Image: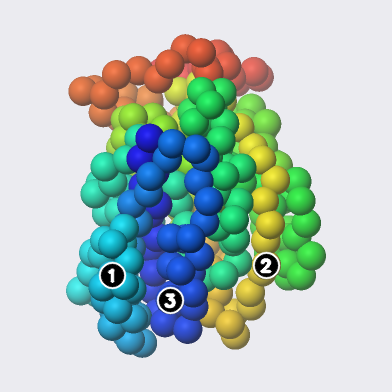
Amino acid sequence: MKVSIVIPVYNEKPTLAEVIRRVVAAPLPEGCEREVIVVNDGSTDGTDLALEECRRQYRAVMTCHVARNEGKGRALRLGIARASGDIVLVQDGDLEYDPLDYHAVLAPIVDGDAQVVYGSRFRASVAGMAWPNWIANRLLTVAANLLFDAGLTDEATAYKAFRAPVLQQLVLTCRRFEFCPEVTAKLRRLGVTIHEVPIRYQPRSIEQGKKIRWWDGVAALWTLAKYRVVPRDRFIRPQVSEVSPAVVRGPLRGFGALR
């Protein structure tokens, strides 16, 4: 199986080379190969030059450059559209997440036990996470569980892996940090079970380059609420076959399955 690792980056020059080194070196489940798709979202700090050096150094790395910053969600959509793998995995351009967890995140999909896997920080340790971020993460997870019967411990985790057809059947519109709530809401509206595995996490501060802000949390809550009521046929690509019934949970308890 081929794994497409999509990395959106914006002004990540200090960490980019090390992130890509770890991504390329990280062990994958047996029989998997990788392609790495890095989307440079209009960086102005020299990230583009560092990225081109990485592309020359590593055969698996492909790059896409956006002229001006349009947001993480938009960059992810561009990367997903270029992915040719059987599995799509999302990686941030900083050092908060450890690619050594790839094997754990990918194994349930490779083994046929899941179609979507989230790496949960809260099933391991979130030591060092700022309290406002901790509270925002918990609120988003509670909201996803209440609205969509998601059964999650970490809705906003960056480590998300998907069987490519499951992800590509969705019409995504995210521009900034709404990718996580949008994809969670839409998958659960389709009845897809989201599997979780524990992962490592090393939080960084705003001074170290963290870009998400409090208003992004508000936007995420709004995104969850919005896609609870948007008709399903507005976000499914009709030409993509339905997901396998083997991992479909069925109607959402408490709210019913909205069409």
Q: Nearer the viewer, residue 238 or 218?
A: 238
* Quarter of the image with the N terminus in it: top left
Exactly how many numbered labels are in the figure?
3
Kindly report the distance in space between the C-alpha atoms of the residues bearing marks 1 and 3.
10 Å
Residue 103, quarter of picture: top right
Residue 236, placed above or below residue 24: above
Question: Nearer the observer, disc 2 or disc 3?
Answer: 3
Kindly report the distance in space between the C-alpha atoms of the residues bearing marks 2 and 1.
26 Å
Q: Is residue 111 left or right of residue 83?
A: right
Check whether the beta carbons of the residues at disc 2 and disc 1 lie within 8 A of each other. Answer: no
Crowding around mark 2 (Cα neighbors within 10 Å: few <14, some 14 to 19, many 20+) is some
Residue found 23% across the figure and 69% down from its top: 65
Amino acid type, residue under disc 2 in the picture:
Gln
Residue 227, quarter of picture: top left
Q: x and y percent of residue 52 in the render?
A: 26, 76
Question: Nearer the observer, disc 2 or disc 1?
Answer: 1
Q: Is residue 187 left or right of residue 36?
A: right
Q: x and y percent of residue 172 in the render?
A: 33, 43
- Which residue is label 2 attached to? 202
Amino acid type, residue under disc 3 in the picture:
Ala
Q: x and y percent of residue 135 in the render?
A: 73, 58
- Which residue is label 3 attached to? 17
Residue found 67% across the figure and 51% down from its top: 199
Residue found 38% across the figure and 45% down from its top: 33
Amino acid type, residue under disc 1 in the picture:
Arg
Q: Is residue 51 left or right of residue 87?
A: left
Residue found 28% across the figure and 83% down from its top: 49
Label for residue 55? 1
